[in-house]
Image: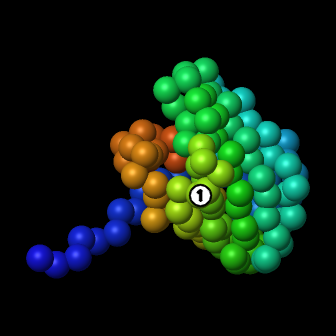
Amino acid sequence: MGKQAERVDSASRVILASPSILFRTFRDTETLKAWRVPDGVIGSFTALQPRTGGGYQLKLQYGDERIGLSAPGMDLIEGRFAKFQPDEHVVEQVRFIGRDGGTAGTMKFETLINPVSGGTQVTLRASALPDAIDAKDHEDALAASLRRLAMLTE
């Protein structure tokens, strides 16, 4: 039996803003939170170091105790910027801290920023996701992130 292709969740949208305006949203915790934290979730970024080799910590608190890899109703996430290429491409290595203090694996999260006629194409792509993350729910969340980014920058 052959190896199955790795799951990749993605969403893409043309946003009416320049690449530099879009990229600036990575440089401030409140701005990053405004588009990256899912609707209905309380989130906070700390220790944000927006550069290759830098990173962040993110705490997500859900209203539902059944959700959460770190604790009931909560996720603790550590991210590292493997690539931070201004106005073009960000690659993050994202680790969900498990309930036992270990990690639920490392997810790769990419943001691609490409100028196109009439705006900028922004693509969010995630791979090597923990099994606990539902594919349809995650793709919906990525699309919602892009909607929030458009509202923030257009």
Classify 104 as above or below 140: below
Q: Inspect the image, locate mark 1, and give the three-letter code of the amino acid beneath it.
A: Thr
Query: Quarter-wise, where is residue 62 in the image?
Result: top right
Quadrant of res 94: bottom right
Mark 1 Cα-neighbour bin, 10 Å: few <14, some 14–19, many ≥20: some
- The N terminus sits in image quarter: bottom left
Give the left or right position of residue 86, taking residue 103 as reference.
right
Horizontal and vertical percent position of residue 85: 74, 77
Q: Is residue 18 visible?
A: no
The answer to which of 83 and 98 lies nearer the viewer is 98
Asked if 132 appears above or below 72 in the picture, the reply is below
Total count of labels: 1
Write the residue at 55% across / 42% down: 69
Residue at figure coordinates x 77%, y 53% from the top left: 57
Q: Nearer the viewer, residue 90 or 117?
A: 90
Residue topped by disc 1: 103
Measured as percent of width and height from the top left, residue 42 is found at 71, 30
Instruction: Give the image location of residue 133, x and y in percent.
Output: 44, 46
Q: Is residue 112 left or right of residue 82?
A: left
What element does badge 1 sit on?
Answer: strand
The colour scheme used to paint the residues is rainbow
Residue at the far left in the pictured view: 1
Q: Residue at x 80, y 46 (%)?
A: 45
Above or below, 36 relative to 11: above
Name the residue located 35 percent from the left edge and 63 percent from the top edge.
Answer: 7
Query: For residue 3, which quarter of the picture?
Result: bottom left
Residue 4 visible here: yes
Task: Give x and y (percent) for residue 78.
Answer: 71, 57
Question: In the rendered image, which quarter contains the C terminus?
Answer: top right
Decide: is 27 above or below 38.
Answer: below
